[in-house]
Amino acid sequence: MIQQNTNDKLRILLCEDDENLGMLLREYVQAKGFLCDLYGDGDAGFKAYLKGRYDFCILDVMMPKKDGFTMASEIRALNQDIPIIFLTAKSLKEDILEGFKIGGDDYITKPFSMEELLLRIEAILRRVKGNKGKEITAYHIGSFTFDVQKQILSRGEEQTKLTTKESDLLSLLCAHANEILERNFALKTIWIDDNYFNARSMDVYITKLRKHLKDDPETEIINIHGKGYKLIAPNITSE
């Protein structure tokens, strides 16, 4: 499980073989209130992980001595919960899928902005924090109530029994309410693979969910071009 440091500052293990980029990233995250240790290869980084108490890992994929995927696999064998972000110059679908299969939480293609990295760190931390509580049994979405266990979406006296895929997708949207649910993350989580046919299937289920929610004009699922989807509602709570 994630081990929070006693000084309440989250400690990041950063492995990046580009010395200039690594130093810039370390200085930036430290300026944002995090502790950060930088290592230039996967072997040194993994040895540091074994000795240190880290809360978060940012790993370059292409590193000498031990690449980021190998290092992440070894970390996952010891710790299933610590968040991992991969940094890479590659954008091939096979590489992205490999990162998620290993257990990565996110994948950022170079070049990227420092602000984007910070937002992705914060989004993952919100998910991690939310997953630590009790199991969510229901969401209140605007004027709707979504019973997660029974897979029933209700509004007043009207009830709609959702399919398993509809329920899983709506649960993910609720967990990321009013923020972007990334398309690849949703596909990897629900369909395991982000191939063309699964992507088209997800589009169909998004359309179905929109129809289920259409009676509340303040609740909608919008497309974020090139990113994914966002569930927007005046108030979304869980129990």
Image (spheres, rainbow, N blue to C red):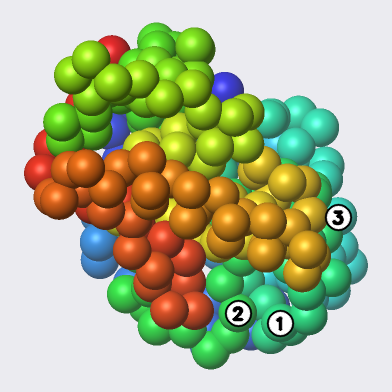
Is 63 left, or right, of 222 in this rendering?
Answer: right
Q: Amino acid type of disc 1? A: Ser
> Going 13% across and 50% down the picture, which residue do you hit?
218
Which numbered tag is attached to residue 91?
Answer: 1
Number of the front mark, 2 or 3: 2
Mark 1 closeness class: few <14, some 14–19, many ≥20 residues within 10 Å: few
Quadrant in the picture for residue 185: bottom right
Q: Position of residue 24 (x, y in %)?
A: 42, 80
> Going 27% across and 53% down the picture, which residue do you hit?
220
> Going 68% across and 70% down the picture, which residue do you hit?
60
Give the mark nearer the N terminus: 2 vs 3. Answer: 3
Q: Position of residue 210 (x, y in %)?
A: 38, 51
> Label 2 belongs to which residue?
109
Q: Mark 3 to mark 1: distance in Å?
A: 18 Å
Q: Secondary structure at mark 3?
A: helix
Q: Amino acid type of disc 2? A: Thr
Locate the N terminus and report the quarter of the image it occupies.
top right
Give the mark nearer the N terminus: 1 vs 2. Answer: 1
Is 166 left, or right, of 95 in this rendering?
Answer: left
